Amino acid sequence: GAVVSQHPSRVICKSGTSVKIECRSLDFQATTMFWYRQFPKQSLMLMATSNEGSKATYEQGVEKDKFLINHASLTLSTLTVTSAHPEDSSFYICSARVVGLGVWDTEAFFGQGTRLTVV
Amino acid sequence: SQQGEEDPQALSIQEGENATMNCSYKTSINNLQWYRQNSGRGLVHLILIRSNEREKHSGRLRVTLDTSKKSSSLLITASRAADTASYFCATVRSTLGRLYFGRGTQLTVWP
């Protein structure tokens, strides 16, 4: 299957700093990427939908100014956690779909996730 | 969860036994997908069933879908220790293709 690379896999940062997480589709183009957050032993919560060349669409309750999403190309989306707080500590996972298919009858490909710890 | 409920939340069985996990969802769907997640890792797609399908097979996996009850089940036959993981169902609701996940079932298969 297609490969999605997410980097870094782990990051520790101090409160108040910003952290950028990258998500790349390595062997396919993705007009749409999705960002999820997962708490320990819980489900994946969709945070936002990232569209290439346009603004991201955020789910209800997700702070746009805190979780900045940029989808500058068909193979790269970034999530920046700004002014990080300890409660932002979590597992963040990106997902991408193949371009060009008109219906969503396709699987999603996931990155390996980023474990963020804010101290 | 954003999508619905899965049960059981945890399932512990012996190798060779069958494992059945259930998923319920709340809204109309385009399709329903099952994913597997090893601890601390990303998700791997297992199988997709469309809203007009009732049953689908893939190797040792069997998925059913009942749109009238808004529920699905995943059966893993002849389980192996390597099947130990969390299993999530996810629904696609709109043309935007957003995937919403259930809470998942933690499956442990003992050798």
Image: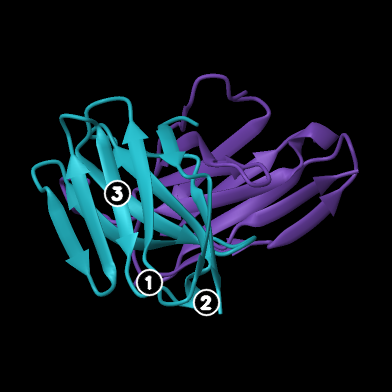
Q: Residues within 10 Å of mark 1 (few under 14, many from 20)?
A: few
Between B87 and A119, the residue placed more toward the observer is: B87
- The answer, for residue A73, to whether it is visible in the render is no
Q: What is the x, y in percent for residue B98?
A: 35, 38
Tell whether A35 sits left or right of A109: right
Residue drawn at the location 68% of the way across and 46% of the way down: A40
SS state under label 3 = strand
The chain drawn in purple is A
SS state under label 1 = loop
Q: What is the x, y in percent for residue A76?
A: 49, 56
* Residue placed under numbered mark 1 in the picture: A27
* Residue placed under numbered mark 3 in the picture: B73
Which residue type does callout 1 highlight?
A: Asp
Between A18 and B107, the residue placed more toward the observer is: B107
User: Which numbered circle lies on residue B81?
Assistant: 2
The chain drawn in cyan is B
Query: Which quarter of the figure has residue A11?
Result: bottom right
Between A15 and A20, the residue placed more toward the observer is: A15
Distance CA(mark 3)–CA(mark 1)? 32 Å
Which residue type does callout 3 highlight?
A: Ser
Chain label for disc 1: A
Q: What is the x, y in percent for residue B91?
A: 31, 40
Q: How crowded is mark 3: few (under 14 residues within 10 Å), some or many (20 or more)?
A: many
Q: Are marks 1 and 2 in contact (CB under 8 Å)?
A: no
Question: Considering only vertical position in the picture, is B83 above or below B49?
Answer: below
